[in-house]
Image (cartoon, grey):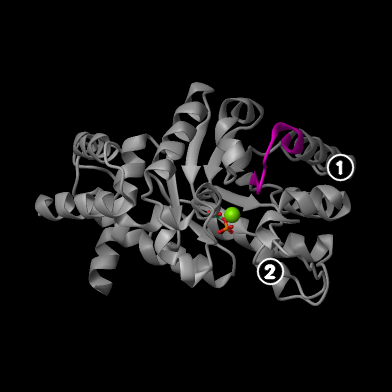
């Protein structure tokens, strides 16, 4: 298997008929960098900045954050690194910032917290911008956006951080900014949201949870949590088409992107890149290299007619097994 990994790493991720699909990784710890590079990742589609915050006893200072972010950006340079602003709340707690709520997943999480605490947001964005000096491979991604107003407010703060950094005589270009599509409301507003940003990235973990009203971490309802649900597939299609209609790229960074069978459908939908756990990258690349994009589109049309997630999954498994 190790030998297989080595030979796969050097090969491009492209279908039999030559359609390229950039495979990116999700990171959090610095240790993820080496694992990603060993498997031939082409960039970072999601750097979860809350991970380094979790190992501290207090909010890291701008300087401390700068050092951590610089490490990520330098390790992947010149490949892009997509840094998501702090996404705490929900299931991700900081010991020094306790939140007690009845419904954490419907409560104070992600962008809602940082817009209520712009000082946390500004420190973080300034650290990201300063860390990218001379590298210019930073992309900024905003979590848990549910509407235009939140996005406008976030963009305003990013511009403010940018001008503050430039006031310190640090010359940095404005990085691409993107929005996570992980709340159903954002799917319905994909055209309006896309107009304001450079790219969109689907968080399929939360989008599945919120579309199906199934807690992503509750074993009792785990059977109902399925990204092959036709409603999820329709939502994903709507996101890609809406972003493309506005001339913006669409990526996906939830666990779904690392499922090789799902990746075939995501390719067929027109996603511009897939971002996944490094462990899954070789499996996804291997399978996408075994199929043509025409065949993938044919399978997508076929499964979009099916109303059961289980039958969609088994239809896909059977069809892909028959490929050889
Ligand atoms: C997601 O929701 O799919 C996602 C990528 O973000 P997280 O898993 O960190 O919530
Ligand atoms: Mg999420």
Q: Is residue 150 located in the magenta-colored stretch of the structure?
A: yes
Mark 2 lies on residue: 52
Vertical side of 230 occupied by 57: above or below = below
Residue 18 % position (x, y):
24, 37
For this rendering, which residue is in front, 185 or 240? 185
Q: Which stretch did the figure color magenta?
A: 140-151
Where disc 2 sits, the SS reads: helix
- Residue 169: numbered disc: 1
Indicate which quadrant contains ligand 1.
Answer: bottom right
Residue 1 % position (x, y):
24, 73
Vertical side of 44 occupied by 102: above or below = below
Q: Is residue 25 located in the magenta-colored stretch of the structure?
A: no
Q: Quadrant of residue 58?
A: bottom right
Vertical side of 1 occupied by 291: above or below = above
| Residue 3 horizontal side relative to residue 53, left or right | left
Q: Who's the residue at 34% across and 49% down the image?
A: 263
Residue 66 % position (x, y):
75, 60
Q: Quadrant of residue 7?
A: bottom left
Judge whether residue 39 can be spotted in this image: no
Judge whether residue 159 can be spotted in this image: yes
| Residue 142 horizontal side relative to residue 294, left or right | right
Structural crowding at the residue carrying mark 1, measured as other residues with C-alpha within 10 Å and reported as few (<14), some (14–19) or many (≥20): few
Q: CA distance from mark 1 to mark 2?
A: 28 Å
């Amino acid at each position: 298997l190790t030998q297989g990994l080595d030979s796969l790493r050097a090969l491009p991720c492209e279908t039999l008929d030559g359609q390229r699909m950039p495979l990116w990784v999700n990171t959090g710890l610095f240790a993820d960098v080496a694992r990603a590079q060993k498997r031939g990742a082409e960039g970072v589609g999601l750097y979860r900045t809350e991970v380094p915050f979790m190992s501290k006893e207090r909010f890291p200072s701008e300087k401390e954050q700068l050092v951590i972010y610089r490490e990520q950006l330098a390790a992947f340079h010149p490949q892009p690194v997509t840094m998501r602003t702090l996404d705490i709340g929900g299931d991700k707690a900081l010991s020094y910032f306790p939140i007690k709520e009845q419904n954490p997943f419907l409560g104070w999480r992600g962008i809602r917290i940082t817009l209520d605490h712009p000082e946390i947001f500004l420190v973080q964005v300034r650290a990201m911008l300063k860390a990218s000096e001379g590298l210019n491979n930073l992309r900024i991604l905003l979590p848990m956006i549910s509407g235009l107003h939140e996005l406008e407010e976030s963009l305003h703060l990013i511009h403010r951080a940018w001008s503050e950094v430039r006031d310190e005589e640090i010359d940095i270009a404005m990085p691409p900014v993107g929005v996570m599509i992980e709340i159903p409301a954002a799917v319905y507003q994909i055209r309006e949201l896309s107009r304001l940003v450079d790219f969109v990235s689907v968080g399929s973990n939360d989008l599945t949870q919120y579309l199906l009203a199934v807690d992503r971490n509750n074993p009792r309802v785990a059977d109902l949590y399925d990204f092959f649900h036709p409603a999820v597939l329709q939502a994903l299609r709507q996101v890609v088409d809406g972003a493309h209609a506005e001339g913006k790229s669409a990526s996906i960074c939830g666990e779904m992107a690392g499922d090789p069978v799902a990746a075939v459908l995501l390719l067929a939908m027109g996603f511009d890149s897939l971002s996944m756990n490094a462990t899954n990258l070789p499996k996804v690349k291997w399978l996408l290299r075994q199929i043509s994009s025409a065949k993938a589109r044919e399978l997508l049309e076929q499964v979009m007619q099916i109303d059961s997630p289980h039958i969609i999954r088994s239809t896909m498994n059977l069809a892909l097994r028959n490929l050889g």
